[in-house]
Amino acid sequence: MSTATPAQTVSAADVRAAGELLGDVVRLTPVEPNRALSERIGGAVFLKCENLQRAGSFKIRGAYTRLARLDPDERACGVVAASAGNHAQGVALAAQLLGIRSRVYMPFGAPLPKIQATHGYGAEVEFAGQTVDESLEVARDWAQRSGAVFIHPFDHPDVVAGQGTVGLEILRQCPDVRTILVGTGGGGLLAGIAAAVRPVRPQVSVIGVQADGAAAWPASLAAGRPVALASMTTMADGIAVGRPGEVTFGIVQEFADGVVTVSEELISRALLLMLERAKLVVEPAGVVSVAALLDPDLAAGFAPPVVAVLSGGNIDPLLMLRVIQHGMAAAGRYLALRLRVPDRPGSLAALLAVLATTRANVLEVEHVRTSPKLSVAEVELALRLETQGRDHCAQVLSVLREAGYPFVTG
């Protein structure tokens, strides 16, 4: 049973009404087939590319729906929101389109591109707290003191209805869909899609996906009520929400088919896969749906055709660089090892000649001569190599072993 009161529920009709309201405001984002993922799970996989939406994520849908329904007095007071970035941009853009003043509180450490974009849409940006939950408290306090209307990032029926228009589009673009995977933080997108899809297509499974290090939903669903996390650690800042919403919890509990979790390794691998194979820039929070497809145990439970929602593409380039490196390491594309060679001219060249036969690319070489573990006649080399995957790593190590080079990996 849903814990939401009747006033808090969102129906499929509510989502359709939001779709009419959004009209030309949002872009009909594409649903693209993905062969690599389809081959992996043995069935059709499609990507709903909300990373290509206005302001870089689905958030404009809910923000505009909420702001457009404010009365003239509320509009005159302005709006305030709190967000790690995507909701901030959605509120700022919606406010700009509707001629409403906006202030946004962001946690310290929010990605610079999201901060700059929020400024660019005309919002006043303030920083508060280390997490979205802490920023939310400050934003609520400002709303009480200033009279501004607080725009919650997920826990309001209008916001949920707006986000649910993603589900309506999926049904039109992929009418045979059997499973929809949705990255989930507070639950606005998951609740909206579930409310839009399940009443009219009950055979479709709608499943939320969270990062292992910020997974409030599984415990909350098991307890039958929203349960707060004591702490969170994940690269997926956009879904790092410590407690499900009251409105979203009831809808997800009633209409969704549960929430699964994925590791940081799978998230980084999924982001790399989207870059390399789909040519799509997706932020970590936006790619967790794909990460679930990379887990064989999870993927076995998803009936195809599967639509994975790429919920956002606003990623800091520096974070992207780190995540790409992490993803390559997780996929076996880097090999780190240490070995000892005689301390005489030509030893390094001889080793590199052996490595050249394996077609591994040498990224870094470090000489160590002063360790007490070394004899005066030898030198230790620390190498980092770029490889073509785990099989290639094994081949490189086999060649080194056969050439008489004892090594230690890692």
Image: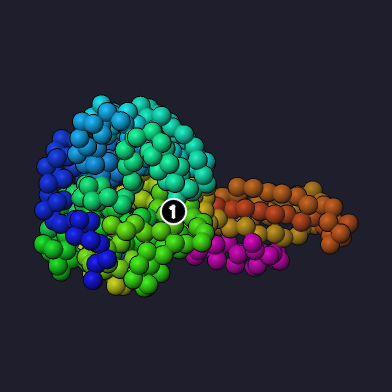
**Considering depth in this image, is 328 or 71 the residue closer to the camera?**
71
Please tell me whether mark 1 sits on a helix, a strand or a loop. Answer: loop
Q: How many marks?
A: 1
Q: Is residue 197 shown left or right of residue 406?
A: left
* Residue 337 can be seen, yes or no: yes
The colour style of the image is rainbow
* Residue 280 can be seen, yes or no: no
Quadrant assignment for the C terminus: bottom right
Residue 118 in which image quadrant: top left
Is the residue 186 above or below the residue 304 in the image? above
Image point (19%, 60%), residue name: 6
Residue 100 % position (x, y) = 28, 29
Image point (60%, 67%), residue name: 398
Give yes or no for residue 403 being in the magenta stretch.
Answer: yes
Residue 295 % position (x, y) = 39, 67
The residue under label 1 is: 240
Is the residue 199 above or below the residue 68 in the image? below
Q: Is residue 262 shown left or right of residue 178?
A: right
Give yes or no for residue 166 being in the magenta stretch.
Answer: no
Quadrant assignment for the N terminus: bottom left
Span shown in magenta:
387-410
Q: Is residue 348 shown left or right of residue 288?
A: right
Image point (76%, 60%), residue name: 340
Residue 78 % position (x, y) = 31, 31
Residue 19 % position (x, y) = 14, 45
**Amino acid type indicated by mark 1:** Ala
